[in-house]
Image: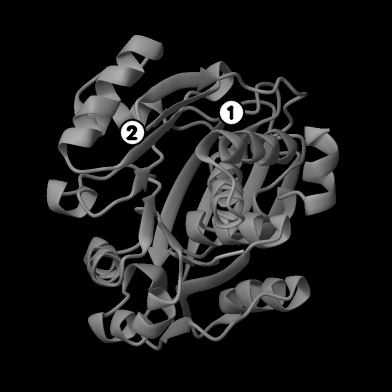
């Protein structure tokens, strides 16, 4: 098992479910509220950790009660807390999540808070940790200058950097050129390549654009259609697992955390994709993000 790290966001999820999502000026009576740990980085790290990965979380918290949501979860799950940064000025980030009970569709507003203020000195302080990793997983939910510095460190030390290009924001080709792998969904892939991804041929075309930018491997998640994988000249769509969906929030994070774990275990990209799909399929059958991440026993049973 190779060492891995997730460098990314932590926010507290404030999630409400209602019969339908409100339109502007409408107030909808909700049926449920839940507060819990979230943020793409944190969700992905929890997914990888629960699946069995040797993974370190690097994020930034405020010095407030919301920070305890992260710390308590990490204590409960037995996750290392040695590489967390703290802001004295900015509070811990939050995400307001609205979920439609009928369709499981969601609307999300993220306020990154402290994890959008990671400094150069903080990134430098974890260089030795990054150097020891086989894989480092990034997202686009923190301040991009911190991601750029991590990318430089990965390049310097020959670490394989995986970039989950979510939530979409414009990034430079120089940044993408340092990525060993990118894992956009079809919408992010279109934003980054200009190719509308709807099927195998258009996914192949988008992959070619990523390759021209210097990326080495491309995975594009296609929701219910499955996952497009492009690696070493082989390009296929791996079909999705069809399950009873309760809440799609965090499905992409489950996938990316599962992928990180499987790759670190030495699985090839095809086997790792199927492992990651199992995590995502299990996560959408439960409510929430971090709390919905499955255990290794659940994943193995599902794959059987």
Give left or right: position of 292 versus 59.
right
**Foreground of the two, 18 or 191:** 191
Give coordinates of residue 77: x percent, y percent.
Answer: 75, 70
Q: Tell me the residue that label 2 is attached to.
A: 188
* Residue 211 on image: x %, y %: 22, 35
- Density class for disc 2 (Cα within 10 Å; few <14, some 14-19, many ≥20) is many
Seen in the picture, residue 228 relative to 132 is either above or below; the reply is: above
280 w.r.t. 6: above or below: above
Q: Quadrant of residue 300?
A: top right
Q: Is residue 198 above or below residue 20?
A: above
Q: In terms of depth relative to the viewer, which is nearer, 186 or 174?
A: 174
Please give the name of the residue rendered at 21% of the width and 66% of the height, measured from the top-left corner: 145
Image quarter for residue 248?
A: top right
Instruction: Place residue 106 in its image quadrant.
Output: top right
Q: Which residue is mark 1?
A: 105
Rendered-image quadrant of the C terminus: top right
Question: Does residue 29 appear left or right of residue 4 in this picture?
Answer: right
Question: Image height check: is 293 above or below 56?
Answer: above
Q: CA distance from mark 1 to mark 2?
A: 18 Å
Q: Nearer the viewer, residue 113 or 205?
A: 205
Q: Is residue 265 left or right of residue 218?
A: right
Residue 248 in sight from this viewpoint: no
User: Which badge, 1 or 2, comes first in the chain's sequence?
Assistant: 1
Residue at 55% from the left image edge and 86% from the top image edge: 82
Q: Residues within 10 Å of mark 1 (few under 14, many from 20)?
A: some
The residue at 24%/80% (across/down) is 120
Colouring mode (rainbow / by chain / secondary structure / one colour) = one colour
> Is residue 202 or residue 262 the one in the foreground?
262
User: Which quarter of the rendering shows the N terminus?
Assistant: bottom right
Which label is found at residue 32? none
Residue 264 is at least partly visible in this image? yes
Is label 2 in a helix, a strand or a loop?
A: helix
């Amino acid at each position: 098992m190779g060492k891995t790290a997730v460098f990314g966001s932590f926010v507290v999820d404030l999630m409400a479910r209602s019969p339908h999502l409100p339109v502007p000026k409408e107030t909808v009576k909700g049926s449920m509220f839940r507060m819990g740990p979230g943020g793409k980085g944190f969700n992905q790290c929890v997914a990888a950790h629960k699946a069995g990965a040797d993974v370190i979380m690097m994020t930034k918290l405020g010095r407030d009660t919301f920070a305890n949501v992260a710390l308590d979860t990490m204590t409960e799950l037995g996750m290392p807390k040695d590489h967390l940064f703290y802001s004295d000025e900015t509070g811990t980030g939050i995400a307001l999540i609205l979920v439609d009970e009928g369709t499981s569709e969601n609307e999300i507003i993220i306020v990154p808070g402290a994890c959008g203020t990671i400094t150069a000195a903080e990134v430098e302080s974890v260089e030795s940790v990054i150097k020891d990793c086989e894989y480092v997983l990034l997202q686009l939910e923190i301040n991009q200058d911190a991601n750029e510095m991590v990318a430089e460190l990965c390049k310097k030390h020959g670490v394989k950097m995986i970039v989950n290009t979510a939530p979409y924001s414009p990034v430079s080709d120089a940044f993408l050129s340092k990525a060993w792998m990118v894992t956009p969904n079809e919408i992010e892939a279109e934003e980054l390549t200009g190719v509308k991804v709807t099927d195998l041929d258009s996914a192949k075309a988008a992959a070619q654009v990523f390759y021209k930018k210097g990326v080495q491997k491309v995975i594009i998640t296609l929701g219910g259609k499955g996952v497009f994988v492009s690696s070493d000249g082989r390009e296929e769509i791996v079909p999705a697992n069809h399950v009873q969906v309760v809440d799609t929030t965090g499905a992409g994070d489950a996938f990316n955390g599962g992928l990180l774990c499987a790759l670190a275990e030495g699985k090839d990209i095809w086997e790792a994709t199927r492992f990651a799909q199992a995590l995502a399929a299990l996560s959408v059958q439960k409510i929430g993000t971090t709390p919905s991440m499955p255990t290794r026993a659940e994943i193995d049973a599902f794959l059987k």
